[in-house]
Structure formats: structure tokens, C-alpha cells
Amino acid sequence: MAKGRIAKQAKTKLNMIIYGASFSGKTTLASQLAYYKREDGSPFRVLYIDAETGGLDSYLDLMEANGVNLGNIYILYTQSLTEVRQYIAKVKNNEDLYELDEDGNETDEIVKDAEGLPFRADAIVIDGATILNLTTQSGLVEFSKKRNKVKADKDGLIGDARLVKIEGAGLEIKDWNTIKFKGQDLILDLMSSGVHCITTCRETDEKESIRTEDGQIASVSTGRKIPDGFKGLEYNTNTVLRTFIDPETNQICAQVIKDRTGVHSVGEIIEDPSLLDWQVVLDRNKGKENFILKNDLTKAVEVEQELYAKEVLGRVGVPAEEIETSENNNVSTVTPDSLRAEINATIKAMTPVQKTEMKKKLTEAGLPTAFKAVTDIEVLKTVLSIVKQ
């Protein structure tokens, strides 16, 4: 739903995308967040989400030698967009982070910062949006194969025809739209986290479609380099930098594609760029109030669907709970699989303490604490209601 506030000076958060070719200084720049200071002079605590499998590791010795206390950096290795968004939510909700075991499961040990206090990130770095995009695409391709398997079963296909139908599955337009939506939602998640954030990704050639002389549609390069990740990733960010190596001087440089903070001008080429140039943005925040605007993109889609349904039914102004469509009355989409999936997703987002309390409640209610073999929908509904308490 819409929100409003009286205009006041709100603190500006760094929200950057840094993209470029391999070894062009993206990780070096992003890692410099660890040199920043909070308003009280204490060092930043940085949640570093590494999708590039060890991108930051080679910089840690140098950072420590330069005075960075590595106890203020927590590195999470994951290539799952869902897990990334779960950790962003933990930061936004001021939740404790828990140490992970070798299998990636949370232990009972709370992550502590250099002062021995529960880790609270002042900044988030996502190193490798390109990889997150690829894994999201791969997941949807597998879903597309399952979708085509259902179609093949329905059409009674066998042999080579069935194989081609399933293995030839690709991303449909709606899948590409889903990927784009997820990318936009990721950036809005970061912007609503209440902390500073940087996202890195590789670069790719910008392409445009043209019609050839023979009437065919062809894709050609415009000669411009753009972020290689979720389409439109840079639209909602305040600052976009493209790093590159000057072929004449072999010097790492950064081209300013966009900078709403005003620290650098659009089109400016920065030799040997330093993230500390943007420390001035934090200095300007003194005396201003914190204001966090939630990411309501998913909620906005739900609201639009709800309002559209009311318009179609001629019931604008009627509370949603009073509107019952024939689909809601006659068709049930709840299945044991869907309920189990919702239960497991809810439990996965819990802390170890919450999981222990939840299991105790289920046991006291005479309900199972393992759900893989449970097929009774009413039992699963009851479990879900307790899990969500």
C-alpha cells in the first residue's frame, strides 16, 4: 500500500553497482567499504556475500596489514539468490546471524563482531550478481523442463518426441520477465535494508535488434558495455561505475556511468579509483534522520491484482475479504506438496532458537516434527499455522 511522510532531511545510503571485465578492480573497490567509519568513529561491519567463490579471500591479508580488523567482516559464500535475499532480510530486521556448519546449516553460535557483540552489518557487498543471475536462469530452465514433461505426459508423447519436448525446454517470455523482476526486487531489497550496499557484476556487450535487408531480425552490438546480470539492475541504484584497465598505462580506472550523490560527474574517468571518495556522503549525514523505505514491489503486485479484480467485478471500494470469486469458491490449489514447501521455507528462515520453540509447540500439540511423509492436508495446515506463529 502507499506510504507517506513529511519531507525531512534523511540520511543518504551508498547504493552502488560496480561492473567490468575480470581483474579490473571490482572486488578491490567493493572491499574498501571495510575502511569506512560510522558516525561515532568505529569501523564499519561488512556482510560480504561472495557468489564468486573466494573473490575476497586474496585481499584479506593486505586489508589486515592496512589496519582492517577482519573480525568486522562476515563472509557468506552462496550462489543462491533466495539465500542472499534471506540474509538481506536478516540485516533489515536487525536479526542475529548464526554460524554455519560444513553443510550450511545454522548452529547455535551467534556471529560476533570484533568487539564480541552480535554482528550488525553497516554495509552489504554482493560480489557476483552475474552468477546469481545464471543460477536463477538455470533454476527456471529446470522448472521449464518439468513444465514440458507435464505437457508431454498430457500429449501422450513417447520416444524421441518426448525427449525433444523435455530436453529442448527453454526459457519462455514469462520466465525472462520473472528473472527481470527478481533482479529489480534484489536491488530494492538492498535499498530497503537500511545499510550501505554495493553489488558487483561482470560486463557484457549491449545488444540491439535490427531488421536486415532480407527482413530478418538480427542482434548486433552497440559497442557499449553494460552490467552482465539481471536486466535493468542499474536502474534503481544511485551510483554506477564501470571499471577497466587502461591499455596504454595498464592503470585500473573507473568510468562514472551514474552518480546521484554528486561526488563525481557522469562520464568522468577516475584513475586508480578509491571508494573513500564517497566518505563525504556519510559526512553529510550528520544530524539527519534515518528513514528506511520498505521494498514493497511484491506487495505492490499483489495490491494491483486485488484492485484489478475489484474493477473487473465492479466491486471497487469493497474490502478484499468480502469478494469471493468463483475461482476461490470452486477451485482448490492447496496440495500436500505445496503445504510442505511452505512449511519448509518458513522453517528455513527461522533462527535455531525459533526452530527449537516451534518443535516444542508441535510436539505438545501431538503433531509431527518431520513432514516429508505427511500427506494429510488438514494436518499440514495445522502444522503450518503453528510454524507461522
Image (cartoon, rainbow, N blue to C red):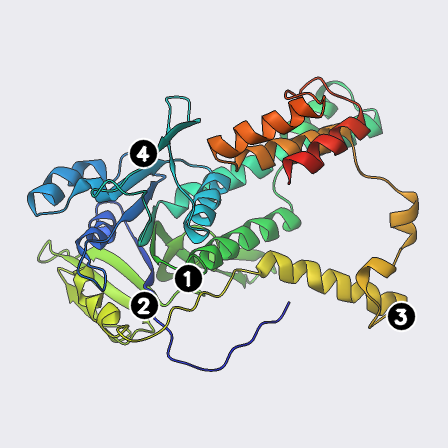
Using the numbered discs, state the Cα–Cα distance from disc 2 to disc 4 in whole angstroms. Answer: 27 Å
Residue at the extreme bottom of the image, as rendered: 7
Q: Which numbered disc, 4 or 3, marks the residue closer to the eye?
A: 3
Q: Horizontal and vertical percent for residue 133?
A: 46, 44
Q: Which numbered disc, 1 or 3, marks the residue closer to the eye?
A: 3
Look at 81% across and 65% down and name the residue there. Answer: 319
- Given residues 286 and 278, the one toward you in this image is 286
Q: Mark 3 points at which residue?
A: 314
Look at 77% across and 22% down and name the residue there. Answer: 375
Residue at the extreme front of the image, as rendered: 364
Q: Name the residue under label 2.
A: 257
Q: Horizontal and vertical percent for residue 370?
A: 64, 20
Using the numbered discs, state the Cα–Cα distance from disc 4 to disc 3 in whole angstroms. Answer: 53 Å
Q: Mark 1 points at which residue?
A: 234
Within-10-Å neighbours for mark 4: few <14, some 14–19, many 20+: some
Q: Which amino acid does label 4 sit on?
A: Thr
Q: Mark 4 points at which residue?
A: 53
